[in-house]
Amino acid sequence: MKTYGIDASALTKSNPTGVERYVHFLLSAMMKAPLEIDERVELYVRSIPAGIGLPRGWSWKVLSFFLSKGWTHGRLSLEMLFSPPTMLFVPGHEVPILTRKSLSVVTTLHDVAFRTHRDVYDPVALHRQDLAVQRAISRARILLTPSEATKSDLQLYYRVAAERIVVTPLAPTLSVILQPSELLRKLQIGARQYVLSISRLEKKKNTALLVRAFAQLKRKLGAGNPLTLVLTGSFGYGEQEIRRVIEEEKITDFVRLTGYVSDEDASILLSNAMCFAFPSVAEGFGIPVLEAMEHGTPVIASNIAVMREVCGDAAVLVSPNDVLALSSAIESMMNAATRDDYRIRGLAQIQKFSWETTAAETWKALRGAVSIR
């Protein structure tokens, strides 16, 4: 019997963001694919998450741990040493520091942006992330990445052989909700009268540059124009700079900082936005741009390799260093014909991505890793 052990600890995280959402939607899609007769799956968790039913052949394995931190390198490591599965899949966190050398390991490396853009990361986090990636590369037989861009970075910066890397593109994680909501009234914004960004508010996501670009456009439009910038997400590295820029640009009254919002509210905000802005300096994939497209919202994104890969010609791509270009791109979306053009392009682009495809490619990689055991 082949046992696929999967680190599913991300399923119990509150307020899930990118990686946690990837784990949830990937595993949900993988559960829909039938197991082979000699296969079973164990999901390693600290506690069983509510509301998730498992199909036949799948089971929870609760690994209790007495510390609030260190579960991966402590408790999961012990499990891999004394009761290992046939193979271990780590989709959303670090590979445990201790495993048997004979254990087949597959893990997902979502990006290595800390190597390509060190200045947008907390210096304390740089060393930890680099060690985690090096550990994953040394232990895993197969590395999954969400994009060709991340695959290229792994080859360039870590000299990983191409045959060890499998690209498994991602897909949207939000359902489209169209019914009216009190949310817009609560935020004091009108439909098609705001620019939306959904991401962590930090240097990597280029939030400060977006604020400056929006402020430049506001000065051009004049005080009477109601255009507003809605920034949805929690703050990350660079919070003080972002808050300072909002104050310096004197646009506090036209910026909404919502914090983390529910899926329903995120969908409503996407459905009613004039456009979606995603000017990140680096990304592993960029699920939010697909979610905007799925909602029929035109996208403005950074002209970087991964965004060219994910967006194709369905978004306005601008340099992540050019305030004027970003401001002009936002202004262009005030034209209804331009918005409609990119709405149509986005709805066509989104058809290229599905979690079913992601799951199928992931299963293929896992079974391939077992076959070379």
Image (cartoon, grey):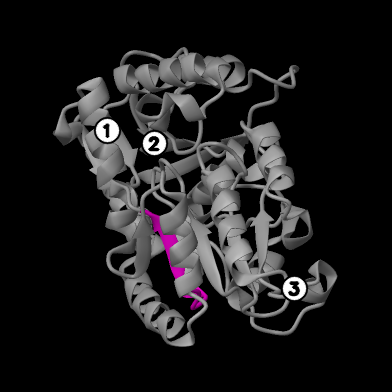
User: Mark 1 or mark 2, which has the lower sequence index?
Assistant: 2
Q: How far is the residue under mark 1 from the one under mark 2?
A: 8 Å
Three-letter amino acid code at disc 1? Answer: Asp
Residue name at image x 37 percent, y 71 percent:
350
Q: Which residue is mark 1?
A: 153
* Mark 1 Cα shell of 10 Å, populated few (<14), some (14-19), many (≥20): some
Q: In the image, which residues are magenta? A: 294-302
Could you say which is closer to the camera, residue 220 or residue 275?
220
Would you say residue 128 sits in the magenta stretch? Answer: no
Q: Is residue 285 above or below residue 32?
A: above
User: Going by the image, does 329 lie left or right of 65?
Assistant: left
- The x and y percentages for residue 68 are 74, 22
Three-letter amino acid code at disc 2? Answer: Asp
Answer yes or no: do the residues labelled 1 and 2 have beta carbons within 8 Å? yes
User: Mark 3 or mark 1, which has the lower sequence index?
Assistant: 1
Which numbered tag is attached to residue 189?
Answer: 3
Q: Is residue 151 above or below residue 188?
A: above
- The x and y percentages for residue 3 are 40, 36
Element marked by disc 3 = loop
Residue name at image x 33 percent, y 45 percent:
38
